[in-house]
Amino acid sequence: MTDLGLFLSKRSVNKAEISRRTGISKSRLTQLSNNNTTKLTAEELYKIALSIEVLPCDLLMEVCKGISLPVK
């Protein structure tokens, strides 16, 4: 499961409702939630955050928590 999938799972959100509100298909939401190689776009992140009533920056921080700059 991806960090987005874990975030949505913790909040017990309904993917069908997110799909309805955002226009992102349920199959795309499933890919974003389960497949670590699927890339989340900024527009998708923003729409998902708005639909679940969280700040987009909070969702971004959660889904990008494992990303860091390379050590020199």
Image: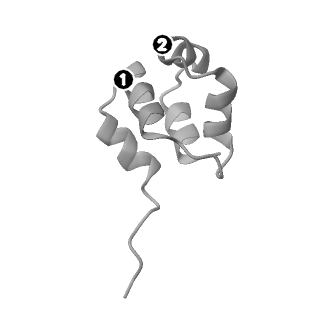
Q: Is 19 or 58 nearer to us in this picture?
A: 19
The percent position of residue 61, horizontal first and vertical second, equals 36, 49
User: Which residue is rendered at x = 68% and y = 45% of the image?
Assistant: 35
Question: Up-down: is 30 above or below 20?
Answer: below
User: Which residue is rendered at x = 54% and y = 13% of the image?
Assistant: 17
The quarter in which the N terminus is drawn is top right
User: Which residue is rendered at x = 67% and y = 37% of the image?
Assistant: 31
Q: Which mark is residue 50?
A: 1
Applied colour scheme: one colour
Q: Is residue 31 left or right of residue 20?
A: right
Q: Secondary structure at mark 1?
A: helix
Q: Is residue 43 left or right of residue 34?
A: left
The percent position of residue 19, horizontal first and vertical second, equals 56, 17
Q: Is 29 or 66 nearer to us in this picture?
A: 29
Local crowd size for mark 1, using a 10 Å CA cut-off: few (<14), some (14–19), many (≥20): some
**Residue type at numbered disc 1:** Leu
Task: Read off the residue under disc 2.
Answer: 21
Q: Is 2 or 48 nearer to us in this picture?
A: 48
Q: Are marks 2 and 1 in contact (CB under 8 Å)?
A: yes
The quarter in which the C terminus is drawn is bottom left
Residue furthest toward the bottom? 72
The percent position of residue 7, horizontal first and vertical second, equals 49, 38
The percent position of residue 5, horizontal first and vertical second, equals 58, 38
Whichever of labels 2 and 1 marks the residue nearer the N terminus, that label is 2
Q: Secondary structure at mark 2?
A: helix
